[in-house]
Image: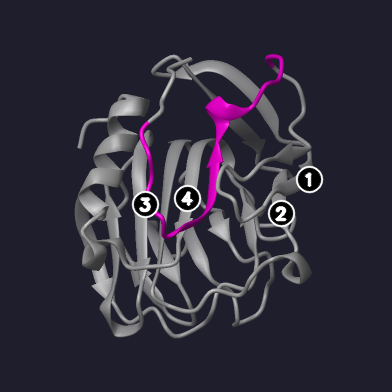
Amino acid sequence: SVVWTAGIPDSAVAWYDATALTLTDGSEVTNWGDETTEGNDLSGTGATYQTGVQNGNAVVRFDGTDDHLTRSDANYTDLTQPITIICVVVDAAQGGSFERIVWRPNTDDSSFGLSWNASNSTWDIWAGNNVYGGSTAPPLILTGIVSGSNSVIRENGTQTGSGDAGDNTMQSISLGGRGGDQVLTGDIGEALVYDADLSVTGDLADEEQRLADKWGIAI
């Protein structure tokens, strides 16, 4: 895999990097450690570690049935907006089923996150309202800036949607599903959550480019 040592912004509160996992090809991922100092490790069953998938890098694969990895509400520090989420989506079905990529793992209107919206056939962000983006096929760098009426969704470094995403907080985190349903059929290489609007702090372009270079994705 590609060795990557570049730093990330101090505003990062969760960082999941498949290249940091030390597993054998095809083995189950029961814990995906947080690379920040916040300790937001994820746990779950079903997802698998796959080597050499994207630009020589490993990914975590979700089978679209029930695989997901979660940090529970009780162990997660509630984040208020603005929040930035960036995910390297290496593969996804983009079909007739919702695919929750980075999500608060619940099913009610207090949900929060970044997903494939099957009703609209686009990527979207949600914090009480939908903000729809485009439908760029993976692999892609998918970015959601959740900041009330100034929310933005970006695909491979280009803004594809904006609007009011609502004012929900991010009270927990799940990768690859909504607590066992609306699950991803595909691969995640890396996912980060920042307690800031990176377009305001000036870090957004650098972070998207860092991930694009690492994962071999043109932006």
Asked which secondary structure carries label 4, the reply is: strand
Q: Residue at horizontal 49%, vertical 82%?
A: 128
Mark closer to the chain start, 1 or 2: 1
- Is residue 208 rendered to the left or right of residue 184? left
Where does label 4 land, which residue? Answer: 192
- The crowd level at tag 2 (other Cα within 10 Å; few <14, some 14-19, many 20+) is many
The residue lying toward the viewer, choosing from 80 and 52, is: 80
Give the answer, above or below, for where 73 lies relative to 141.
below
Query: Toward which corner of the image does residue 179 lie, by quadrant?
Result: bottom right
Where does label 2 land, which residue? Answer: 70
**Residue 44, disc:** 1
Residue 16 painted magenta: yes
Q: Is residue 205 visible?
A: yes
Q: CA distance from mark 3 to mark 1?
A: 27 Å
Asked which secondary structure carries label 3, the reply is: loop
- Is residue 178 rendered to the left or right of residue 132? right
Q: CA distance from mark 2 to mark 3?
A: 23 Å
- The crowd level at tag 4 (other Cα within 10 Å; few <14, some 14-19, many 20+) is many
Where does label 3 land, which residue? Answer: 9
The residue lying toward the viewer, choosing from 132 and 75, is: 75
Which kind of residue does numbered mark 4 sit on?
Leu
